Amino acid sequence: MAVMARAGVFEDLRDWMNEVERIGEMVVIRGADPHLEIGSITEYAYRATAGGPAILFEDVRGFPGGYRILTNPLSTMRRLSLTLNVDAPQNEMDFVQFWRKHSKSFEMRPVEQVSDGPLFQNVQEGADVDLLQFPTPLWHQEDGGPYLGTGSLTITRDADSGWVNVGTYRAMVHDHNTLGLYVSRIKHGRRHMESWWARKEPCPVVLTFGQDPLLFLVSSIGFPAEVNELEYAGAIRERPVQVIHGELTGLPIPAAAEIAIEGEIYPDDTRDEGPFGEWTGYYASDTRPEPVIRVKRLMYRDQPIILGVPPFRPPNTNTLSRTLIKAGLIWDNLDAAGVPDVRGVWADEAGGGNLMVVVSIKQRYPGHARQAGLIASQCAAAITLARYVIVVDEDIDPSNRDDVLWAICTRSDPERSIEILHRCFSSALDPITTGPGPYHHSRAVIDACKPFERLNSFPHVVSLDRAEYEDIRQKWGSYFEGWTKP
């Protein structure tokens, strides 16, 4: 089925949930315990059901009725397509190719400022701020504390240029009015914080903890500097995101958010944060001093919904969306660098959508495969821990792990096919790194293409080609519907 753009319908998380429930991809669970049980149910549902439904936790144990938690929002292609305002594609690579083309036609939509919204149904300021009223889960067994910020937005502004960034960074609840924030040094949010600290001033910050999943998705992609994620979300939705001007920070706050805080991050104001079970599948960052948010103002809707996207060992609830969008961005970077005849890109879910990148090319000249691999390993879209980059021929589907491993096993020679790059960017989340930083790690580019000088003499493949496969599928595929691999 072809992928097509369509008109968006969601104003907020609740509209999105109504549609997900209508299509039969929502499960409601009542009475679960936020201490480990909600996180465990979320991971179990994902692993036991090949992605699984979105899960709404109601009547959370130990908290008044009305406080809710939504997890597993974007783990199926159908819900991801719904969120991104397109019809569901037939397969992953169809989606990547469609999204690259579709996104180039976007018209950025400046935010629309409004004076009021449901977010103001409950407001606490100063000493009245109470973050402990929310059923914040302890997501993993060895987490250092409850994390309210997993599917959250962190909104900051550069002190010099005024550029507004929306990122997703983990936020741990220290006490009733203090949050711990972990932001890697390469992230735009950290750059903004340091721009204020250079002036000896606190960095103003807004966090939201429940919102249209589209806003979470664009905040977690990793766009180039100066791109406004709220405007990009407006382009996808085909209408502006409505925002409220933060009374204390002056920052834009999505008006339909479920929960939001305004606060400040002071220079040298830190507390021990972590550990936290991260997207690599490890408690990699340990416990260390990290910046503290002093919460000055708390706003939330009646019966608020926390959006929880806890990472665990990949693939996990967030790797599908990260993989699809990141693959397209890496492909765009390769095109911009002049690498010709790229036929596909994939950021494998087993590596959390980051650690392993596969590029498929039609070889045109000697060194073409190395060029593609080296550029993919260092481009902006892959800078976060792209430890392995594998380049394959055009007959290999980069999203098919069996295809890729077969190409490595039969077309690469360990002595000649692997390039090692030293002292590349890394972070404290990388389980291989040690010490206080700065962090580096090596990267490998694996040339799993047929040797260029043997393109015409390499042994022929024993398999149906794509045209033959499709012909058989159309004629005889109905005999095998409903059968899956054991």
Image: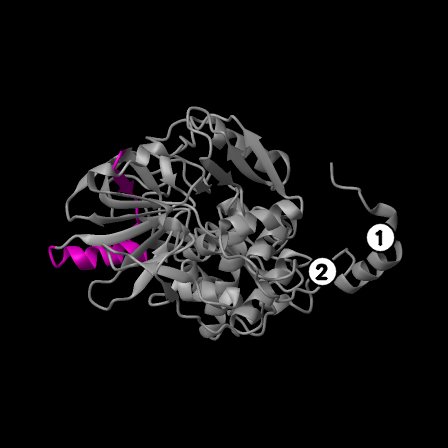
Label 1, label 2: how many angstroms apart (C-alpha)? 29 Å
- Residue 322: x and y, percent? 50, 53
Of callouts 1 and 2, the N-terminal one: 2
User: Which residue position is annotated with label 2?
Assistant: 459
**x and y percent of residue 138 in the render?**
40, 30
Count neighbours of disc 1 (C-alpha within 10 A) and say few if under 14, some if 14 to 19, many if 20 or more: few
Q: Nearer the viewer, residue 63 or 86?
A: 63
Q: Secondary structure at mark 1?
A: helix
Are the two marked residues, 1 and 2, in contact with CB atoms closer than 8 angstroms? no
Left or right, 100 with respect to 309, comes to right
Q: How many numbered marks does the figure carry?
A: 2
The residue that appears at 18% across and 57% down in the rendered structure is 196
Say what secondary structure mark 2 lies in. Answer: loop
Residue type for callout 2: Pro
Q: Nearer the viewer, residue 279 or 291?
A: 291
> 356 and 287: which one is in front?
287
Q: Which residue is mark 1?
A: 477
Range covered by the magenta-colored residues: 175-200
Give residue 234's position: percent from left, percent from top.
Answer: 46, 65
In which quadrant will I find the N terminus?
Answer: bottom right
Which image quarter holds the C terminus? top right
Expressed as whole percent of the image width and height from the top left, the position of residue 90 reads 69, 58
Q: Is residue 135 above or below residue 388?
A: above
Asked whether residue 124 is drawn in magenta, I would say no
Q: Residues within 10 Å of mark 2 (few under 14, many from 20)?
A: few
Numbered badge on residue 391: none
